Amino acid sequence: QGEDVLAGLSHISVNTAARNVNLYPFPSKAPNHVSEDPEEKLDSDAEYTQIQPYAGMPKEVLLLHSSKARYRVTREILFWLMVACTLALVALTVTVIALSPRCMNWWQVSPVYQVYLRSFSDSDGDGVGDLKGIQKQLDHFQYLNIKSVWVGPFYRSPMRDSGYDVEDFRAIDPLFGTMNDFEELLAKMHSVGLKLIMDFIPNHTSDRHRWFNLSRATDPHYKDYYVWSDCDGSSPRPNNWVSVFGRSAWTYDEVRGQCYLHQFLKEQPELNFRNPHVRKEMTDIIHFWLAKGVDGFRMGAVKHLLEAAHLRDEPQVDPNKAPVSWDLYHDYTISQLGLHDLLRDWRAEMEAYSREPGKYRFMVTESYDYEEVDKTMMYYGTSLVKESDFPFNFYLLDLPQNTSGLWVQHLVQLWMDNMPKGQWANWLVGNHDKPRIASSAGQTYIRVINMLLLTLPGTPTTYYGEEIGMENVNSASRDPQRSPMQWSGDMNAGFNNKTNVTWLPVHPDYRSINVEVQNSFNAVQLWRNILAPLLHRVYPPRPPLSLPGPEER
């Protein structure tokens, strides 16, 4: 009760003060009349018509003035102005995001360096490069400011086609090391910020693969894993199809009593991708390597993945000549309907592994389409369905045909004018199947061609040794551009410093053209100087690395 009494007295005192106090220090501006009636309402307009707002005014006085037009309109103007500014800021943010280029991924900010495994670095002295040899040379990639490394096939293989005839997709060939060696290499590469891209060879297997042996034995599950057709050893082949090497694409198998298709060597039977079991097998293999942490795949020979089921003869360019590969219109053996659906399915499987930040899985396709550039562009996919990040651009391989600037411009525009809007370009001037650029164009052009490769918009891909101007070796085989990497002027060019054995001869010029001397054109420094500014904007700077000496190689 005491508290209630005090509250009442306080209320009376405040109201009394509000009625009697002189609210204005200047008498000329004081109100003419202050009501003494305690029952009269404070919110009467007549009572406060001359009172101006003042600091410490009661709530009733504040509400009285705030409802007047000059204050109400001002509030509303400020409120809607804030709303408009907020909406404009949101619209501006959305516009900037929509119009700004996407952040570049790891495969866009660095060249891809192709390692031909047999020839890169030999760690055990058997004359053949291996996985441990790559690990020993990781400093070289960092010295060049390279972040992405593509390693050629290292699957278990009888090596009839340099490892492209796969006997087991889940095993490492002992020639190159063990699975532990691979896992150590991958972990080491990731620890120093490098990405590993590996070859995926889906079109065919080795004739020693378990699937083929079961298929030729007509095992119910594996019977249709390959493309078989009725024929016998003495009768004509099922049709006039020829392999890329110019001979018949059919070979008679005595065990099964039928012919099997091979678009490459007869030791490389063609898988039947119209069989859903085959598709699942290859998808499972993709999962196997992605689960190990591989950063991407180069999908090889993809245009050969499907063949026409009707097996009709392909039309000849000149019917009066015997059919060879280059005298047939390959209407039924390459780029068949369903090919891109298959590749998009694999891309979708890879996307599931790309969701973690910094773990994007890269996919590039290989398809030599020559003048049919529109076919190559289809490997980008569509605006709705993604396929490869880019198909390899092989058109700069024609640079040695003409060294004029107009020819270079033509080759560059051929790609840029046909590339779908919003896609990413790529460039290469050499690989394991084509002559080295120093041999085909000449040493004079090495520096300018490397500069062109590194400064064109898109991702450049370089073949090992191109950064120092390596040349072909004299060889009657298909391997003149695959000679051992020239690391130094020491024995075997530093490729194998344990024994005097190399699987191919080292080029005689290795004492003057090697990584240590960085050749007379200083091409290695060119790579470092061009790439360093870009990479320092994308990756945190690392301590400078000194080029390893011969005792460290």
Image (cartoon, rainbow, N blue to C red):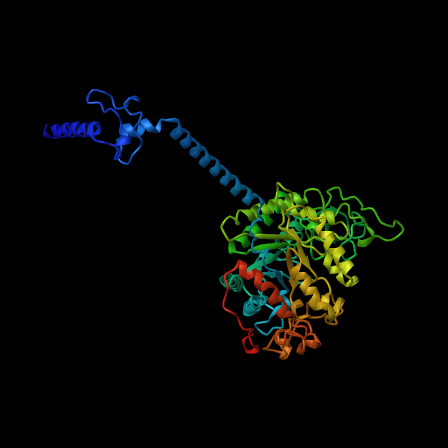
Q: Nearer the viewer, residue 87 or 386?
A: 87
Residue 82 at x, y = what percent?
A: 44, 36
Residue drawn at x 64%, y 71% as measured from the top left = 485
Vertical order, 37 against 14 (above or below): above
Which part of the image, by quadrant, shows the C terminus? Answer: bottom right
Tell me which residue sits at (59%, 71%) in the image: 122
Q: Position of residue 484 (x, y in %)?
A: 65, 71
* Image quarter of residue 296: bottom right
In the rendered view, tell whether residue 329 sits above or below residue 515: above
Q: Nearer the viewer, residue 135 or 391?
A: 391
- The relative height of residue 27 versus residue 180 in the rendered view (above or below) is above
Which residue lies most toward the right here? 320
Report the front residue among 461 and 159.
Answer: 461
Give x and y (percent) for residue 428.
Answer: 68, 59
- The answer to whether 184 appears left or right of 2 in the picture is right
> Is residue 394 in view from this perspective?
yes
Q: Nearer the viewer, residue 245 or 24?
A: 24
Q: Position of residue 439 (x, y in %)?
A: 74, 69
